Amino acid sequence: MSLKIKSFITLLGIAFGANVALGQTAKGNQFPDGTPIPAWFSDTSPVNVKKNGKVYDVTKYGVKQDSNLLQTEAIQKVIDLASKKGGTVLIPKGVFLSGALFFKPKTHLHVVEGGKLKGSDDIANYPKIPSRMEGQNLDYYAALVNAYGVNGFTISGGGTIDGNGRKFWDAFWLRRTINPNCTNLEVSRPRLVFIWNSNNVQVENVKLHNAGFWTSHYYQCNNVKIINVDIRSPHEPVRAPSTDAIDIDVCNNVLIKGCYMSVNDDAIALKGGKGPWADEDKNNGPNTNILIEDCEFGFCHSALTLGSESIHNKNVLMRNCRVDEAKRILWLKMRPDTPQKYEYVTVENVTGNAYSMIFVKPWTQFFDLKGKKEAPLSYSQNITMRNLDVKCDVFFDIAITKHDRLANFTFENLKVEAKNDKYDKSIIDGVTFKNVVVNGKTID
């Protein structure tokens, strides 16, 4: 844990009392629905490369340290070799340029500090294959690092995986200039890391920078740990579009701990499917038991977002975090063409600043009922924000339509400075304000 995070948690404990110091709330170590958080979430043991089999230093197998030489095939041969008996593919110090790489069962990736796996900026080096993007299964470009069905997969080492995304960003903004309504998928861009149908995954102590598209995407995975990862893509002077730091898509048991995230889109986004029949599609599903703690957020559209392609999220806990320059701390995207249920979501022990503390509004971009006559109902319920000390422009940024149902929102132990301190409790069925101080005044 960084010194900055430790210092802020200590101050948080002083501010809110010993019962909330270091992440211990009055309700104990539980998920929002009251179920205990399993011991698995407390085990943050680092990746032990020696236990993962033989280490394959790519330079010992013909790969050259050359930032201008594309070596996709040579690096893939090392991965294929490692998969025969199991082992770790090691990227040593230096820069190694590659297109899409496909890790196989029993393989791992270790990028040493001072080492960089750099992505090609030519989309031709990322084949179009069966994939998952924006809540739908389709053929799409492979990521730089891909793991399909690789149980126990790990990425570690302290080094950098760099998407080299500038060319892709420029192409996107050029396309948007020509057609302001173009979708993300109309511009060919690769993700940085995509892990699909893999259990017991651990990504730790690496830098994920300059993604061409989403930075890291986990789909249909169970038991994922993302620990001490530094994730960055710029928002100025050039904006890196849609570079979400972490996209969780139909996953169960996810720990995101000690990470730094600053990207030109959502930091952590929970996905799962979109469209009027999304809940009937076997490729879609819920995200459950998501724990986010001891993280720091730089610029982002939101620290924690549910949606925009999401049908069910339950037991989401974000705690002991620092937010700086975020547009929103918690964003519930209510997509009117998709049946949604967001429940048992808690954000607690957070300091910092954002434009909006909580943002709940319809997400109408690319609205499409696909011929269905009636828009489905969507629900957000049992949402809690407690123990926050924040500055924001808007305190209560919530508006709904007749297709949205909000219920059982709790705001507790909040100290807020806001330019706009207005609030409307009538749009929520059952809302509690307890020890909420906005601009020095207690509200109820």
Image: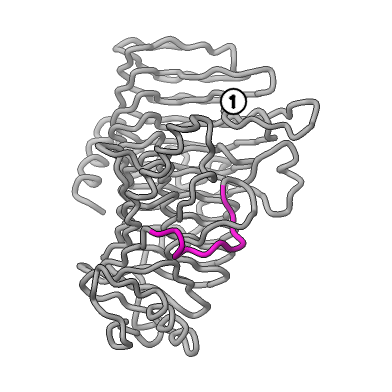
Using the image, determine if residue 69 lies above or below residue 51: above
Residue 151 image offset from top left, x and y in percent:
53, 72
Q: How is the image coloured?
A: one colour
Residue 70 image offset from top left, x and y in percent:
34, 71
Magenta highlight on residue 153: no
Using the image, determine if residue 425 lies above or below residue 375: above
Q: Secondary structure at mark 1?
A: strand
Instruction: Kindly identify the residue that appears in the image at 27 percent across and 83 percent down.
Output: 59
Using the image, determine if residue 208 lies above or below residue 373: below
The count of marks equals 1
Few, some or many C-alpha atoms within 10 Å of disc 1 (few <14, some 14-19, many ≥20)? some
Residue 6 image offset from top left, x and y in percent:
23, 47
Can residue 205 be spotted in the picture? no
Using the image, determine if residue 18 lies above or below residue 67: above
Instruction: Kindly identify the residue that appears in the image at 35 percent across and 50 percent down.
Output: 167
Image-quadrant location for residue 426? top right
Can residue 279 be spotted in the picture? yes
Viewer-proximal residue among 223 and 75 = 75
Instruction: Kindly identify the residue that appears in the image at 45 percent across and 78 percent down.
Output: 107
Q: Give the left or right position of residue 335, taking residue 412 as reference.
A: right
Instruction: Kindly identify the residue that appears in the image at 61 percent across and 46 percent down.
Output: 135
Viewer-proximal residue among 14 and 230 = 230
Residue 343 image offset from top left, x and y in percent:
60, 36
Q: Which segment is the magenta one?
A: 122-133
Magenta highlight on residue 132: yes
Q: Quadrant of the N terminus?
A: bottom left
Q: Give the left or right position of residue 227, taking residue 105 as reference.
A: left
Q: Amino acid at mark 1?
A: Asn
Viewer-proximal residue among 73 and 336 = 73
> Which residue is farthest front?
178
- The residue that disc 1 covers is 408
